[in-house]
């Protein structure tokens, strides 16, 4: 696996490399990331990963400084996953001058995750567009765990007419259903045992919807109450349309249940797609 830090080195390495498939990450890789890397292999000739902890998408009181940085272990994982090239820039490499041009997503950026992390999706969209311009991939993979991020980036690519196929990778979970995340490392032992409740609550909502319930607001409130009764501090549980993450209208069937809740220090997110009964 080749490792490059500068834009010029990377662009030189990518010449004549056929169809390029890109998987951007912030490092501290787990099985979910590696699943994307392996999936990428089936979509092109050259798999490029990046590791960059992007300051622009962290709020002033979030964990930018303490975010786990495990570069050597990450490199070993990427080699095992047969990644061809790793782009690992420093902040000086990626932002050689203050970033004054930004991508400003539509109002969905201020809902759900964006309500609790102001500016987050602006920072994500800006760095991803910059990475796309550097790597110039034919396809890029993002995990469905960050469902809102995937939708925003997919729409950005479509509206800016970028020649990039955006592919969503399914959530990789632990045996008890917990979605794998770099921030799971923050969980204490007793919190880790409790953490699987988040996914169980989503499955309860899915079962209720498939059984015909349409009182979505009540389902959301009940789920939040259950989590908070077991020591969580819940930001939201929301039932939305998959296509645009807006509130369902009568007749909408293709839905997604999204949740974000804090358990101790870490803030965990998860989602579950559901097709409602047509009746």
Image (spheres, rainbow, N blue to C red):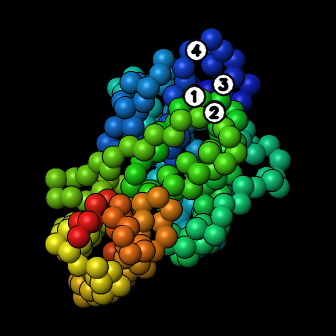
Q: Please give the name of the residue rendered at 38% of the width and 75% of the height, measured from the top-left corner.
A: 250
Q: Please give the name of the residue rendered at 53% of the width and 35% of the height, measured from the top-left corner.
A: 165
Q: Please give the name of the residue rendered at 23% of the width and 78% of the height, measured from the top-left corner.
A: 213
Is residue 200 visible in this depiction of the protein? no
Per the rendering, the mark at residue 17 is 4
Q: Residues within 10 Å of mark 2 (few under 14, many from 20)?
A: few
**Considering only order in the chain, which callout, 4 or 3, is on the residue closer to the N terminus?**
3
Residue situated in front as seen by the camera: 98 or 147: 147
**Residue picked out by circle 3:** 10
**Residue picked out by circle 2:** 163
**Considering only order in the chain, which callout, 3 or 1, is on the residue closer to the N terminus?**
3
Estimate the spatial distance between the alpha carbons at disc 3 and disc 2, rounded to whole Å. 19 Å
Examine the image and state in which quarter residue 195 appears: bottom left
Could you tell me which secondary element the residue under label 4 belongs to? Answer: loop
Where in the figure is residue 115, as x and y percent of width and height? 56, 76
Location of the C terminus by quadrant is: bottom left
**Residue picked out by circle 1:** 138
């Amino acid at each position: 696996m080749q490792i490059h830090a500068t834009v010029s080195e990377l662009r030189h390495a990518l010449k004549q490399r056929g169809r390029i498939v890109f998987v951007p990450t912030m490092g501290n890789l787990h099985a979910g990331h590696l699943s994307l890397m392996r999936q990428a292999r089936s979509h092109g000739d050259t798999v490029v990963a990046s590791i960059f902890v992007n300051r622009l998408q962290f709020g002033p009181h979030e964990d930018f400084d303490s975010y786990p940085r495990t570069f050597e272990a990450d490199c070993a994982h990427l080699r095992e996953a047969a990644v061809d090239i790793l782009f690992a820039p420093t902040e000086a490499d990626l932002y050689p001058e203050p970033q004054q041009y930004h991508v400003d997503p539509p109002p969905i950026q201020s809902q759900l995750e964006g309500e609790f992390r102001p500016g987050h999706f602006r920072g994500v969209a800006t760095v991803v567009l910059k990475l796309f311009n550097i790597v110039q991939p034919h396809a890029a993979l993002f995990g469905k765990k960050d469902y809102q991020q995937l939708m925003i980036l997919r729409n950005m690519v479509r509206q800016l007419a970028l020649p990039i196929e955006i592919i969503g990778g399914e959530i990789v979970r632990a045996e008890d259903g917990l979605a794998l995340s770099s921030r799971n490392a923050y969980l204490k032992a007793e919190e880790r045992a409790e953490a699987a409740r988040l996914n169980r609550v989503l499955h309860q909502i899915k079962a209720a919807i498939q059984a015909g319930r349409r009182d979505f607001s009540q389902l959301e409130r009940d789920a939040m109450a259950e989590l908070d009764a077991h020591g969580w501090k819940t930001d939201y549980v929301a039932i939305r349309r998959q296509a645009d993450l807006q509130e369902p209208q009568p007749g909408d069937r293709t839905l997604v249940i999204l949740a974000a809740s804090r358990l101790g220090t870490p803030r965990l997110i998860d989602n579950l797609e559901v097709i409602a009964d047509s009746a």
